[in-house]
Image (tube, grey):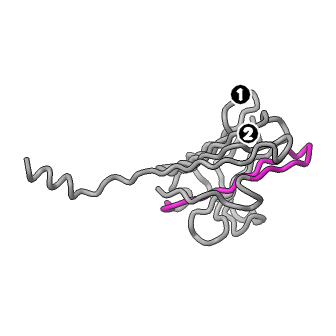
Amino acid sequence: MWTLGLILAMAPAPAMADAKVFDDPVGDSTFVDISRVRVVHRDSVTVRVRSAVPLATGQLYAFWIDAGHGPQPDYYVAFRANTDFDEVLRLVRSFSDRRSLVQCRGIRLRADIFTDEPVSIRIPRRCLENPGRVRVAVQFKDESADTVDWAVDRRTFGPWVKR
């Protein structure tokens, strides 16, 4: 029995997933107003974004993901509510870059103007080259009202989230 206890004590613990939540000031934008971002890093990277105002048509939800490969973003994904979503990411070198597409089976994108659910993305880690840590920047843009809100700030990432 003592030997079994010693073996279990010496075995490496399973990797613990990390989660970070960061708030964005409410009222800093109209028509689109991010209030909270939650990032969970497990077998997938999941980002959920709450808005202080209801989602509407004509809005674009954009996410930049830094997977630790340098000071700039590595991946970009953007979509509109209640549309068909492709299973693709864009490989990028900066916030303005829209380079090549990366096929990503299992990516999930959700934004529904008819519910109160948060806008969310779920990206399998293998699509991001299995990073040890990630951080995200989020932008909601209302194209009809020409209004933009960023979380945390314009072209600024939130905190690192380790796996």
* Of residues 58 and 101, the one drawn nearer to the viewer in this rendering: 58
Q: Is residue 96 left or right of residue 101?
A: right
| Residue picked out by circle 1 | 115
Q: Position of residue 136 (x, y in %)?
A: 64, 56
Q: Which residues are magenta?
A: 130-150
Residue positioned 91% across, 48% down in the render = 146
Q: Nearer the viewer, mark 1 or mark 2?
A: 2
Q: Position of residue 37 (x, y in %)?
A: 65, 46
Residue sitting at the far bottom: 70
Give the mark count: 2
Type of amino acid at the residue the image marks with label 2: Ser
Residue positioned 67% across, 69% down in the render = 72
100 versus 33 height, above or below: below
| Residue picked out by circle 2 | 51
Residue positioned 72% across, 33% down in the render = 112
Is residue 143 rendered magenta in the image? yes
Q: Position of residue 142 (x, y in %)?
A: 85, 44
Within 10 Å of disc 1 (Cα), the crowding (few <14, some 14-19, many 20+) is few
Type of amino acid at the residue the image marks with label 1: Thr
Task: Look at the numbered discs 1 and 2 and tell me whether their residues touch, using CB distance below 8 Å.
Answer: no
Q: Is residue 44 left or right of residue 91?
A: left
Determine the secondary structure under disc 2: strand
Is residue 58 rendered magenta in the image? no
* Of residues 78 and 22, the one drawn nearer to the viewer in this rendering: 22
Residue positioned 74% across, 64% down in the render = 95
Report the predominant secondary structure element of the magenta stretch.
strand
Residue sitting at the far top: 114
Q: Position of residue 77 (x, y in %)?
A: 69, 53
Tell me how far mark 1 sits from mark 2, CA to CA: 12 Å
Which of the two discs, 1 and 2, labels the residue nearer the N terminus? Answer: 2
